[in-house]
Amino acid sequence: MNGFSLSKAIQRGLEALAAISLLLMMLITFVDVTGRYFFNVPVMGSTELIEVLLAVMVFMAFPLVSWNEENICVDLMDNYFPTKWIGVRQIAINLICSASLILVAMMNWKLAGRSMEYEEVTEILEMPLGYVTYLISITGFVGGSLTLFNALVYGKKLFSRTPPSADLTAKSKEA
């Protein structure tokens, strides 16, 4: 399996898990509201299930947002930033984001271990919270790795550029 097909498989898997969790949240909400309204019988623990599924949905989509660089950003300095330094800026931003994501994932991994050790569970359904925290940590590692991959791609583009004179020569031959 080459790198492109592996990346597509990861992307499809994360998208599918996020979509399934959203679908389950909608179904649980529908069944809960219908049960409450028509039969006066709500789904026990529906709020907890929806909270867990919301975490799953958000953190399955999180690496995709990092990978596609669709994060919220403020472009206050873009008009003043020299065009020739955009590649360097993107490398620096992606490296900082990658280090931050991996650091947060490491802290979450420790928190998940502590949660499992203390046997923390939800109030009604008594679902172990450590597994959800492990999932959050894993997606943080994946997001950090994909952001690091973005930095490497920008680096490759930056350092494998042909000289501007070669670009002009190639364009004049095409015309």
Image (cartoon, grey):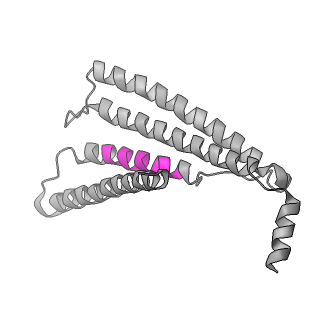
Q: Please tell me in which quadrant of the rendered image residue 127 appears.
A: top left
List x then y, in percent, for residue 59: 42, 45
Residue at 30 percent across and 48 percent down: it is 50
Main SS of the magenta segment?
helix
Residue at 20 percent across and 56 percent down: it is 32
List x then y, in percent, for residue 114: 35, 20
Q: Residue furthest right?
A: 165
Residue at 25 percent across and 31 percent down: it is 128
List x then y, in percent, for residue 39: 11, 60
**Would residue 81 be seen by someone viewing this image from the given angle?**
no
Is 12 displayed left or right of 166 in the figure?
A: left
Front residue of this view, candidates 88 and 107: 88
Q: Is residue 53 inside the magenta stretch?
A: yes
**Would residue 2 be seen by someone viewing this image from the given angle?**
yes
Residue at 25 percent across and 22 percent down: it is 119
Q: Residue furthest front?
A: 173
How many discs appear? 0
Front residue of this view, candidates 161 and 8: 161
Quarter placement of the C terminus: bottom right
Front residue of this view, candidates 22 and 164: 164
Q: Which residues are magenta?
A: 52-65
Q: Please tell me in which quadrant of the rendered image residue 164 appears.
A: bottom right
Q: Please tell me in which quadrant of the rendered image residue 83 appears.
A: bottom right
Q: Is residue 68 inside the magenta stretch?
A: no
List x then y, in percent, for residue 134: 36, 32
Is 85 displayed left or right of 145 in the figure?
A: right
Q: Residue furthest bottom?
A: 175
Is 66 displayed left or right of 25 in the figure?
A: right
